[in-house]
Image: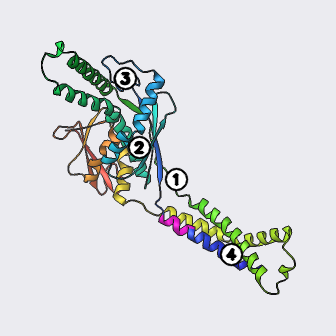
Amino acid sequence: MRRWRVVVVVVIAVGVVVVWSYLTPKQWEASIVVRLDPLVVPGLREDAAVPTPPGTADAAAQELAAARGATFQDGLASTASFPFDLTADPGPTEGTVRFTAQADSAERSVAGVYSAANGFLAWGRAQEAVGRQTALQRELDALTPVDPVPDNPAAGDLQARIDTAGAAIEQLAAGGGSVVTKPVVPDDPVSPDLTARMIVAAVVGLVAGLALAWALDRRRPGSPRLARPHGPAQVALAVVAVSALLLPLAGVVAGVVSVWELRPSTNAQDEAGYACLPGWLDDLPDDTVVAISGDSPRFFADHVQEFAFPRLTVAAPGTVPEVLVNIVAGPGPDPCGGYHREVTRP
């Protein structure tokens, strides 16, 4: 049996996997847990003038269905500045939801789950009630005003259902929920698993190489193997010998994995921004009205909402914030990612 044939097949198999993995985008994963407060909101899902408050289990199932629904997921994707895959699952305790995002960088996975949590608490939970309220109002406006609303049963029913949906929306606005477990920036990508792929490729290549070498030796004219088939001991010895030849490749495999893990996936400014914004906001007191100055790079102003909500409030355009954060390139106080932070209180 020609051992070099086996080695060549293994090297080719591993090489194909390495090239394939380098061409496969890396994905990182982060999770966040939010508490839905209050969980039971009469009129949030049921279209009735006097809705029956759902039980806790039913309310939790409805909230999870809304978080997984296309209406929320598509709406969130349409506002995102980068693509990410989002899943929603029951949280560790009653009345909580876990959002998990996969993106092409560690920082983007964290920003993705923050966007999902903030979006669901701010508008996602109330989407159904808002849409129903709008549709009912259109239906009410289309009625022929024959009688005043109190004397018109159809109009009165519509108005009562509008008021019920409005009460549910107001209840959520008064206390939509909070973040229970903050996401952690992952150190390693969840996919693709280059090490596992290379191990599988080596095993498959070894088996294929042994089979190829055995087949070629059997077909070679005058080969003694035509008269004497391989026994289990000989096959085992061949496997051990080939494995010994492959041991030096372990260092090469480790080097390939290390180089692959250093492969960049997003531009440097995005990485710096996603890594620095949380730290620049963490020391601000809860409920502070904050804004990023107009002199700061546009990236930070565009993404501050993701890390401020729900603990902080981002000042509306044209209003004066309690704290104005200016992000300046170069060294200075609170440095991070080639920038530093300057805080003023107008």
Total marks in image:
4
Amino acid type for the residue under numbered disc 2? Val
Q: Residue at x 52, y 55 (%)?
A: 191
Amino acid type for the residue under numbered disc 4? Val
Q: Residue at x 21, y 38 (%)?
A: 316
Contact between labelled residues 3 and 1, with CB atoms less than 8 Å apart: no
Residue corresponding to mark 4: 7
Mark 4–mark 2 distance (CA, rounded to whole Å)? 45 Å
**In this view, the mark in front (4 or 2):** 4
Mark 2–mark 1 distance (CA, rounded to whole Å)? 16 Å
The numbered mark, 1 or 3, whose residue comes first in the sequence reads 3
User: In the structure shown, which secondary structural element does the residue marked by tag 1 occupy?
Assistant: loop
Mark 3–mark 4 distance (CA, rounded to whole Å)? 66 Å
The numbered mark, 3 or 4, whose residue comes first in the sequence reads 4
Residue corresponding to mark 1: 190
Magenta segment boundaries in residue numbering: 17-23
Q: Which mark is residue 278?
A: none
Decide whether the magenta segment is chiefly helix, strand or loop: helix
Residue corresponding to mark 3: 41
Q: Is residue 7 left or right of residue 93?
A: right
In the picture, the quarter occupied by the N terminus is: bottom right
User: In the structure shown, which secondary structural element does the residue marked by tag 3 occupy?
Assistant: loop
Amino acid type for the residue under numbered disc 3? Val
Determine if residue 283 is in view: no
From this view, report whether residue 309 is shown above or below residue 338: above
The numbered mark, 4 or 1, whose residue comes first in the sequence reads 4
Can you give x and y, in whole percent of width and height, for residue 32 in the image?
45, 40
